[in-house]
Amino acid sequence: MSDAALPGARIPVTVLTGYLGAGKTTLLNRILSEDHGRRYAVIVNEFGEVGIDNDLILNTDEELFEMNNGCICCTVRGDLIRTLHGLLGRAGQGGFDAIIVETTGLADPGPVAQTFFVDPFLQERTVLDSVTTVVDARHVMLRLDDSREAVEQVAFADQIVLNKTELVNEDELRRVEARLRRLNPLAPIHRAQRSNVALDKVLGRGGFDIERIVTLEPDFLNPAHGEAGHVHDEHCGHDHHDHEHHEHHDHEHDSGIASISLTSRRPMDGTRISLWLNGLVASKGPDILRAKGIIDVQGEERRLVFQSVHMILEGDLQRPWRPDEDRYSRLVFIGRNLNREALQAGFLGCEAT
Ligand SMILES: Nc1nc2c(ncn2[C@@H]2O[C@H](COP(=O)(O)OP(=O)(O)OP(=O)(O)O)[C@@H](O)[C@H]2O)c(=O)[nH]1
C-alpha cells in the first residue's frame, strides 16, 4: 500500500492533458490496467454534452467520475472542486490512493492545476504530483500553429509523453522535440507508442514545480475575480462567458470548434456505416479533429468502437453487449465547419433496413 493511504497523508493528483486524440485515454487505460497495487480515482472531463469516454475506459473497479459539461471555463472548475470534495469525503477509508484527472483535449491545464492551490480543502488534502501532457507526434506541429490550448498544454507540462512516434520518421521526431523544447525547456520528453511510457517514469515523481509555473504565470496563486484563474462557485453570480450553447447536444467552443453527437437506437448496417465513416474522414478529415463512437452493428454481438483523429481511423470489436443493456449507436464529432444535418442524414442512412 502506498503512503497516500495513510491517514492525514495528502493524496497525489496527476492531471493528464494533451490535445484531442493525443492518447490520454490510452495512457489512462494503461495506468488502470497495470498491476501496481495502487487504486486510482479517475475524473474525466469531456468536451461536448454527451459523453462517450466513460464507455471507452476499461472496466476496472476504480472509481470513475465523468464531467461532460463543456469547455474548461469557470463552471468546470466549480464542478471539479465539487467532485473532488465529494470524492475526498470518502478517501482514507480504503477507497483509493491517488487521483487522475483527464482533461478535455481543448483544455488549458492552468485553471485545472490551479484548483489544487486555491481551494483550502484541496490544498490540505491533495498534492499536485504532475501535469503530464500527451503529444501526438503526427499532428502536433499543425496544432501548435493553430491552437492556443495546444501551446499552453506543452508549456505547462512537467513531463511530456511524445506519443504515436511510429507515425513519423526520426528527422520529424527530432523537429517535433526541438519545437517542444523551445516551448518547454525543462520537461522530460518520453517517446511512446500507444502511450507505453513506463509508469514509474510518470507517476509519483513529484514533478510539478510551482516555482516554474509562477514564473510562467505570475498570477497563478492569486487570481482575481474576472481573471482566468479565478475560481468561481455558485455564489459568484457571473456571466457564463460568451460560449454559445446551441440546440441540444451541440456545443461550440470560442475557437470555432464544435462538437456534434448523434444517437440511434436502431442497429446499423455494418458495411454501410464503415463505408460512410471511411468516406467521411477521407473527405472531411482536415476539419474533423476527432471522432469516436460506439456502434450497434446488426447481427454482431459485440460493440463496434470506432475512433478517428483527422484521417486516421480505427475500428475495433470490443466486449459483447450485455443481455440487460439497451443497445444504441452513438457518434461524437469534434471539429470545425461540421454540418449537423448532413452528418445526421448520413448516419441515419446507415441504419439497417
Ligand atoms: N497509430 C497510433 N495510434 C494511437 C497511438 N496511441 C493512441 N492511438 C489512437 O489514437 C486515438 C486516440 O487515442 P485516445 O487515447 O482516445 O486519445 P485522447 O487523447 O484520450 O482523445 P480525446 O479524449 O478525444 O482528447 C485512438 O484511436 C487510439 O487507438 C499510437 O501511439 N499510435
Image (tube, grey):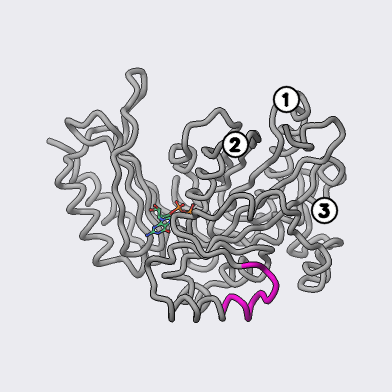
Q: Quadrant of residue 124?
A: top right
The picture places residue 261, in percent across and down from the top left corner, at 39, 47
The picture places residue 190, in percent across and down from the top left corner, at 57, 64
Where 327 falls versus 75 (above or below)?
above
Q: Quadrant of residue 64?
A: top right
Question: Which element type, helix, strand or loop, lies under badge 3?
Answer: helix
How many marks are shown on the rendered structure? 3
Mark with earlier residue (3, 2): 2
Please tell me which residue is depicted at 61% across the width and 69% down the height of the picture: 154
The residue pinned by badge 3 equals 117
The residue pinned by badge 2 equals 65
Q: Amino acid at mark 2?
A: Phe
Crowding at dot 2, Cα within 10 Å, few <14 / some 14-19 / many 20+, comes out as some
Q: Which mark is residue 94?
A: 1
Crowding at dot 1, Cα within 10 Å, few <14 / some 14-19 / many 20+, comes out as few
Of 320 and 342, nearer the camera is 320
